[in-house]
Image: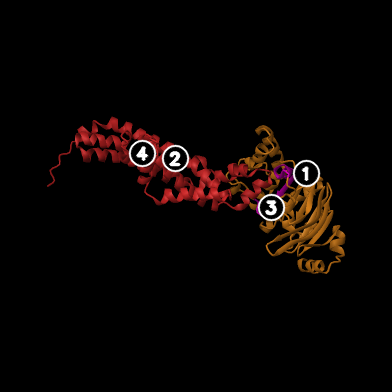
Amino acid sequence: MIEIENVRKSFGPLEVLKGINLTVAKGEVLTVIGGSGSGKSTLLTCINGLEAIDSGRILVDGIEVHAKGTNLNKLRQKIGIVFQQWNAFPHLTVLENVMLAQVKVLKRSRAQAEAEAVKQLNHVGLSDKLAVYPARLSGGQQQRMAIARALAMSPDYMLFDEVTSALDPQLVGEVLDTLRMLASEGMTMICVTHEMKFAREVSDRVAFFHKGVMAEIAPPEQLFGAPKDPELQKFLAATH
Amino acid sequence: MFNYNFRWNQALNSLPQMLEGALVTMEIAVLSMAIGITIAIVLTLFRLSGIRALSAVAATWVEIARNTPALFQIYMVHFGLGGFGIHLSPYLSLLIGIAFNNAGYLAENFRGALKAIPETQTRAARSLGMTPIQAFHNVIMPQMLRISFLPMTNQMVWAILMTSLGAVVAMNTDLYGVTSDLNARTFRTFELFAIAAVIFYLITKAITLSARLVAARLFRY
């Protein structure tokens, strides 16, 4: 379970998270929507401790992320994150990209790591690209590789930060299909996205962020069907 | 006015000795590069550490190595340290002097290379649970070494040529030292130094060519 309690975060004079309260249960798929600068991406990087917070706290399976004694490297093994820029490691083949952290961080043997990597790459439909360097892949393929790389760490949670925003339109579908597949397999996921149709289909709940505040959270039919927050109404009108 | 008689045969008889000298020259260059690269990586880490004292050490090293003559650096290792009672052989003084110079230039190359690697690479590595050291070692450093591979090759060539500066510390077993001793005994100056120059040229050419082969083999991405 991920528990976010009254989290505040500023970048200089700009407060990007103004007291966020949110709980994500095991197996839940939460999507987060909102305009740019609404704080939704920052929240994700706070959950895995890449960003510090100013006050409040975030608990992942009862472990406080920003507490002093917390072993963040260990905690991050539970929490996979995939970013807008896919960040393939260019000097490694697709297979090696997915094996690296397994060997170095989880201390799996090379054979074990390779088996897991092959399994995950197969899962995201890249089994014919194992020996290829990322430069030879399309953006969608690189992004799916990044997803496989995160999944290979056997995380309990997956965070997706606008993973389709940097892709050419015709490549968005293959990545969203991968996310749909993960959701249907019961992975606990938080997806920050601009894909409304996707959010409506896969989410258990959808949260709308506006200027650092979680203005509304509800199941998709309700949030998209009968939005209450006036900002959300404006947002949906503009994106439809 | 021009009545010098070439005696190539006499000079060529010394070729075996000169080739032995060439081996010493290559040995010093290779060792000084190995030491230089290692120190340069440490200096780069110092600069990345965010610890003021460490980055000051790195910055000072780079400033001195790049902005003073290599000859002075070698001289200082031999005679400067000698003043403090640390007496190094000409071989060691030359090796350390060149390694010092290499480290300074390479650290600066590495810094440039690091700027070319997106910050998000470290972020991706860290979010997979890697420690900062693991991220640097497995993700950043390989890319950094690739980007600075050509400058490293240049530095290697420069290291070969710098061995001739061993003259100031009475180094006499390297290619320059051997040639210079032969010259003192035979006065076949033009022939001897022409042969030495050709050997230097062949060594540096061999380095640039093999670097190209290594690069093609190593960097397939």
Residue depicted at 46% across the width and 38% down the height: B35
The chain coloured red in the image: B
Which residue corresponds to mark 2?
B33
Vertical side of B63 occupied by B28: above or below = above
Residue depicted at 36% across the width and 46% down the height: B72
Q: What is the spatial separation of the Cα atoms under label 2 and label 1, in whole angstroms?
A: 46 Å
The residues colored magenta run A69-86
Q: Chain of mark 2?
A: B
Residues flagged by tags 4 and 2 on a common chain: yes
Helix, strand or loop for disc 3: loop
Which numbered dot is residue A83?
3
Q: What is the spatial separation of the Cα atoms under label 4 and label 2, in whole angstroms?
A: 15 Å
Q: What is the spatial separation of the Cα atoms under label 4 and label 3, in whole angstroms?
A: 48 Å
From the top left corner, tell me how far across and down residue A189 is, in percent.
78, 50
Decide which of A141, A4 is in the foreground and name it: A4
Q: Does the stretch in magenta take in A81?
A: yes
Vertical side of A213 occupied by A109: above or below = above
Verify CB contact (< 8 Å) between mark 1 and mark 3.
no
Residue B31 makes an appearance in the image: yes
Q: Chain of mark 3?
A: A
Q: Chain of mark 4?
A: B
Which residue corresponds to mark 4?
B203
- Residue B86 sits in which quadrant? top left
Helix, strand or loop for disc 4: helix
Verify CB contact (< 8 Å) between mark 4 and mark 3.
no
Which residue corresponds to mark 1?
A156
Residues flagged by tags 1 and 3 on a common chain: yes
Q: Does the stretch in magenta take in B203?
A: no
The chain coloured orange in the image: A
Decide which of A156, B40 is in the foreground and name it: B40
Verify CB contact (< 8 Å) between mark 2 and mark 3.
no
Q: Chain of mark 1?
A: A
